Image (tube, grey):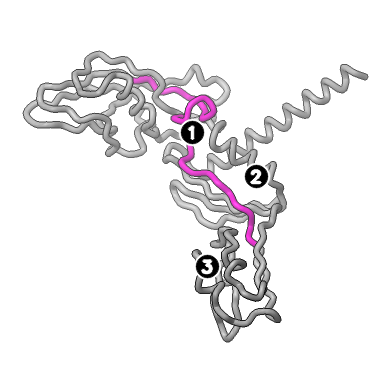
């Protein structure tokens, strides 16, 4: 297998996985969504809440605030998650005017863990209302609850293969005109493929071509991955951690299969 990096920033990575198959690509995708561990608020103790929202609603909103955490923390906690817990506390009161309580108002004992943004609204208080609570963040995985999923988007598509039969092409320009992603262009009286990676395999170019001169299909051995982190973990760490987990699963499966064979020989 080969991996080619296309784009990368703090919260997003796009890459091509070549020489694989749909089963492997989908397993990697599902593990990124559901089995890469991260940190999320799991328990909230309310000491005082006179806001308009019930305790349960505020607890749910707190749980869905992504928490930025050091990948080394995740590495250390992956095998013994119950030993790792981070406490947050919140003590706010609206006095003379209405007050919006934001994620940035959460305080923590661990300076290395914080909300990915300080501007996520939790609740609005009117004068005289107060919110005092303690919250405990724990390690978990998205399979147990979506709050622990480290990705906001994780998908792949087949690598587009676009074939143009120039002997049948009448240069009507329909495929260029109607392509929603502007994959094709007309250059020197010839239709050329300008940006194949932008193709979504919608095949609308085939539909509007009057001469059946263009064919589009997906290469089921090459995949274009698009992974967007919630901000809790770097996107490259999420991909590598998913690959590590997949490798461990395969090794465990082979080990169990070997044991079964030995039992029956």
- Image point (56%, 82%), residue name: 187
- Specify the principal SS of the magenta part: strand
Q: Position of residue 168 (x, y in %)?
A: 69, 79
Disc 1 versus disc 3: nearer the observer: 3
User: Which residue does the numbered mark 2 point to in the structure image?
Assistant: 25
User: Which residue does the numbered mark 1 point to in the structure image?
Assistant: 149
Label whose residue precedes the other's in the sequence (2 or 1) = 2
- Image point (39%, 24%), residue name: 41
In the rendered image, the vertical position of residue 259 relative to residue 222, given as above or below = above
Q: Quadrant of residue 46?
A: top left
Question: For the residue carrying disc 3, how many other residues have a C-alpha within 10 Å: few (<14), some (14-19), or many (20+)?
Answer: some
Closer to the camera in the image, 157 or 28: 157
Q: Which mark is residue 34?
A: none
Left or right, 17 with reference to 187: right
Residue range in magenta is 135-160
**Which residue occupies the extreme left position in the image?**
96
| Number of on-image labels | 3
Label whose residue precedes the other's in the sequence (1 or 3) = 1
Magenta highlight on residue 137: yes
């Amino acid at each position: 297998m080969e991996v080619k990096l296309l784009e990368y920033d703090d919260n997003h990575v796009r890459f091509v996985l070549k020489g694989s198959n749909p089963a492997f690509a989908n397993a990697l995708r599902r593990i990124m969504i559901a089995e890469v561990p991260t940190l999320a608020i799991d328990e909230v103790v309310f000491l005082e809440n006179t806001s308009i929202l019930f305790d349960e609603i505020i607890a749910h909103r707190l749980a869905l605030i992504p928490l930025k955490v050091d990948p080394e923390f995740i590495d250390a906690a992956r095998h013994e998650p119950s030993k790792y817990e981070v406490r947050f506390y919140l003590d706010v009161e609206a006095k003379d005017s209405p007050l919006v309580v934001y994620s940035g108002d959460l305080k923590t004992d661990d300076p290395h863990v914080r909300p990915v943004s300080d501007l996520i609204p939790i609740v609005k208080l009117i004068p005289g209302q107060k919110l005092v609570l303690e919250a405990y963040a724990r390690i978990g995985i998205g399979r147990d609850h979506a709050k622990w999923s480290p990705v906001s988007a994780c998908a792949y598509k087949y690598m587009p293969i676009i074939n143009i039969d120039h002997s049948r092409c009448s240069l009507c320009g329909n495929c260029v005109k109607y392509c929603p992603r502007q994959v094709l262009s007309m250059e020197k009286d010839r239709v050329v493929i300008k940006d194949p990676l932008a193709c979504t395999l919608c095949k609308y170019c085939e539909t509007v071509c009057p001469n059946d001169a263009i064919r589009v299909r997906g290469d089921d051995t090459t995949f274009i991955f698009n992974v967007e982190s919630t901000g809790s973990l770097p996107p490259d760490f999420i991909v590598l951690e998913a690959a590590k987990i997949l490798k461990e699963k395969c090794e465990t499966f082979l080990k169990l299969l070997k044991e079964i064979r030995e039992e029956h020989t």
